[in-house]
Image (cartoon, helix red, strand yellow):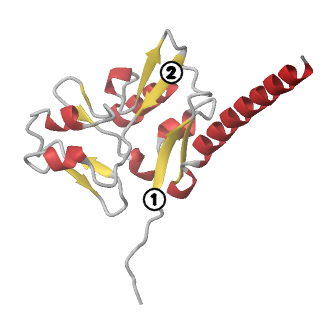
């Protein structure tokens, strides 16, 4: 019998339609991790796209095969058996290779220290405290459901518009 502990991989997901850019997630993260309400110390960032009217939460995607880990010359980044990325500040030499390689821009640097989301060891405070539910912590198997719903709604709107256009043309 296999006695190895099995983990259901969970991920943080965000719903851009719900994010208001309140930055509570940044404050909560900084407080729980650094004991300061300073968003610069947060492991999650809200990127504001003013022209588009979007606020986008940026956080570690806990990649299956993380590039940031692979480029670290001293092995300061690791992935635990639970699938959570970890940064060992004692081993980090500050070369910036991880920060430069992350395709999501999820690794940050502030006051001589790199920061990377570790999902609060499986209980991410950003998701717990998000007032609109824009940030959620879900089983990996459920992560695509919100995107599928949004895509389906978009397709439905487009189909309805096309049908209305066709009906209007046939009435003429």
Instruction: Tell me the residue at 58%/21% (across/down).
Output: 20
In the shown orientation, is residue 171 left or right of residue 51?
Answer: right
Q: Which mark is residue 85?
A: none
Instruction: Tell me the residue at 40%/85% (across/down).
Output: 2
Q: Position of residue 87 (x, y in %)?
A: 23, 45
Query: Disc 1 versus disc 2: distance between alpha carbons?
Result: 26 Å
Q: Residues within 10 Å of mark 2 (few under 14, many from 20)?
A: many
**Helix, strand or loop status at disc 1:** loop
**Helix, strand or loop status at disc 2:** strand
Q: How crowded is mark 1: few (under 14 residues within 10 Å), some or many (20 or more)?
A: some
Instruction: Tell me the residue at 44%/52% (across/down).
Output: 122
Tell which residue pokes out farthest to the bottom in this image.
Answer: 1
Q: In this view, does 44 lie above or below 147?
A: above
Tell which residue pokes out farthest to the top in this image.
Answer: 51
Q: Considering depth in this image, is 31 or 42 the residue closer to the camera?
A: 42
Screen quadrant of the N terminus: bottom left
Screen quadrant of the C terminus: top right
Q: Is residue 76 visible in the rendered structure shown here? A: no
Residue 130 sits in quarter: top right
Tell which residue pokes out farthest to the right in this image.
Answer: 171
Q: Where is residue 81 in the image (x, y as percent from the top left)?
A: 32, 64
Query: Which residue is the site of mark 2?
Result: 55
In the shown orientation, is residue 164 left or right of residue 36?
Answer: right
Residue 149 sits in quarter: top right
Q: Considering depth in this image, is 46 or 122 the residue closer to the camera?
A: 46
In the shown orientation, is residue 73 left or right of residue 155?
Answer: left
Query: Which residue is the site of mark 1?
Result: 9
């Amino acid at each position: 019998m296999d006695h190895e502990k099995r983990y259901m991989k969970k991920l943080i997901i965000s719903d851009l339609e719900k994010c208001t850019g309140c930055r509570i997630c940044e404050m909560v993260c900084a407080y729980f991790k650094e004991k300061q309400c300073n968003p610069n110390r947060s492991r999650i960032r809200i990127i504001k796209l003013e022209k588009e009217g979007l606020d986008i939460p940026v956080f570690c995607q806990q990649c299956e095969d993380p590039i940031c880990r692979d480029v670290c010359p001293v092995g300061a980044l690791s992935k635990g058996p639970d699938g959570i990325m970890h940064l060992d500040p004692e081993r980090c030499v500050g070369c910036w290779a991880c920060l430069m390689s992350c395709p999501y821009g999820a690794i940050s640097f502030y006051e001589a220290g790199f920061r990377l989301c570790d999902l609060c060891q499986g209980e991410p405070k950003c998701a717990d405290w998000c007032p609109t539910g824009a940030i959620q912590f879900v089983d990996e198997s459920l992560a695509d459901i919100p995107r599928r719903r949004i895509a389906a709604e978009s397709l439905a709107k487009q189909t309805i518009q096309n049908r209305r256009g066709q009906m209007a043309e046939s009435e003429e």
